[in-house]
Image (spheres, grey):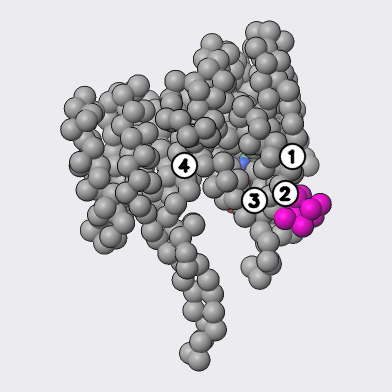
Amino acid sequence: MKFNIAVLPGDGIGPEVMTEGVRVLESVGQKFNHQFILHYGDIGGIAIDRHGTALPQETLTISQNADAVLLAAVGGPKWDDPTAKVRPEDGLLGIRKELGLFANLRPVKIMPMLADATTIKPNVVQGVDLVVVRELTGGLYFGKPKKQWQTGRGRRAVDTLAYSEHEIERILRVGFELARTRRKKLASVDKANVLETSRLWRQIAIELAPEYPDIELQHVLVDSCAMRLIQRPTDFDVIVTENTFGDILTDEASMLAGSMGMLPSASLGTKNKGKLSLTGHSFGMYEPIHGSAPSRAGQNKANPIATILSVAMMLRYSLALAKEAAAIENAVLQVLKDGYRTYDIMEEGKSLVGTREMGSLIMKRL
Ligand code: NAD
């Protein structure tokens, strides 16, 4: 089969980890007889430098025309000035919004051989297998007004937390549907004791529940969820939550897996106004959950596994190539079983490798 893939390496370690992701994708193409036509685009800081905007129209066009989008990471100290008019993250938020990618899926599955690599006790993390479904195009990050201004008594700033019924219902449905394909437990995370948007969220979750009688639904306050994720993470199967809570909880959850460098993500939408499908035909953008790790850039040190596993998610959710996705996931597992580690997951007695070598080892195991 033939697929068009938009490839957006971005900044910092982005280009390095993306190179390994693309090499693994091309190996899958050769092995399983598929053609992946790659269309490269600039996004983030590099796009600001080259085009004066974090999301050039050309990048958006190639992404809109592709079957799926692969993105690495954006940002870095060069573009960090808080008074700057354009910021690398504008590119990230912009492309999610423009492509209508409202559902962000972040699986956190502990690889048994990495249980000792986390800062949390191995007996707590052993067996963790959960997915956070994060609403991605609404809430605080997008609500208006969003501004800073000068008053007679100093500066003020405002962000707006707003959600519509439609936005809440469609993301909750993704949570319910995903739970159906797994252990049938859904934790809907909100702050209904304080926030009005959360009260609407909880009301809608309660209204939808009778349509999914096979799913065990529980409501968890976000502060309690943050605690339980560290205390008893194996209690969770699918967690569904709004944008800001999801952003914070997924970084926390990544520590269960040992490193941000291990975790992939999928951001799914309905490009052609169809129904969002979890069976391989959704339009999506796939990216590691980590940032551009500027202090590690250009040193052949970054862990490319999160990007490589994002490629696997793309094969599964957008290209309906489940067998190929599993081949990548197995190859990663085998290489870890063989004892190879990048610096971020390194332990005594294991073999330290760089970005490039980790990519080559995974390709060899495919
Ligand atoms: P970060 O995710 O880049 O790094 C956090 C920590 O994890 C650092 O210690 C880093 O060295 C390490 N790390 C991250 N990815 C790794 C990998 N693949 N292998 C090994 N170690 C890895 O977050 P940060 O330091 O807060 O932010 C750095 C820049 O990235 C900032 O400009 C920020 O705005 C941007 N950022 C971008 C995204 C994105 O593109 N999705 C997400 C978060 C942060």
Task: Give, as a single range, the part of the protein colored magenta.
Answer: 44-53
SS at mark 1? loop
x and y percent of residue 325 in the render? Answer: 55, 17
Residue 196 visible in the current orientation: yes
Say if the magenta span includes residue 145. no
Circle on res. 30:
none
The residue furthest right is: 50
Answer whether labels 2 and 4 touch (C-beta < 8 Å).
no
Could you classify mark 1 by the number of other residues whose Cα lies within 10 Å: few (under 14), some (14-19), or many (20 or more)? many
Tell me: 17 left or right of 162: right
Q: In terms of sequence position, does the residue under pointer 2 or pointer 4 come before the other?
A: 2
Whether the residue under disc 1 has CB within 8 Å of ligand 1: no
Q: In terms of sequence position, does the residue under pointer 3 or pointer 2 come before the other?
A: 2
Q: CA distance from mark 4 to mark 3?
A: 16 Å
Could you classify mark 2 by the number of other residues whose Cα lies within 10 Å: few (under 14), some (14-19), or many (20 or more)? some
Residue behind mark 3: 91
Residue ID at (68%, 67%): 84
Q: In terms of sequence position, does the residue under pointer 4 or pointer 1 come before the other?
A: 1
Circle on res. 56:
2
Residue behind mark 4: 102
Residue behind mark 1: 41
Q: Amino acid at mark 4?
A: Phe
Q: Amino acid at mark 3?
A: Gly
Residue 352 visible in the current orientation: no
x and y percent of residue 308 in the render? Answer: 62, 27
Quarter of the image where the N terminus is located: top right
Q: In this rendering, is residue 339 above or below 161?
A: above
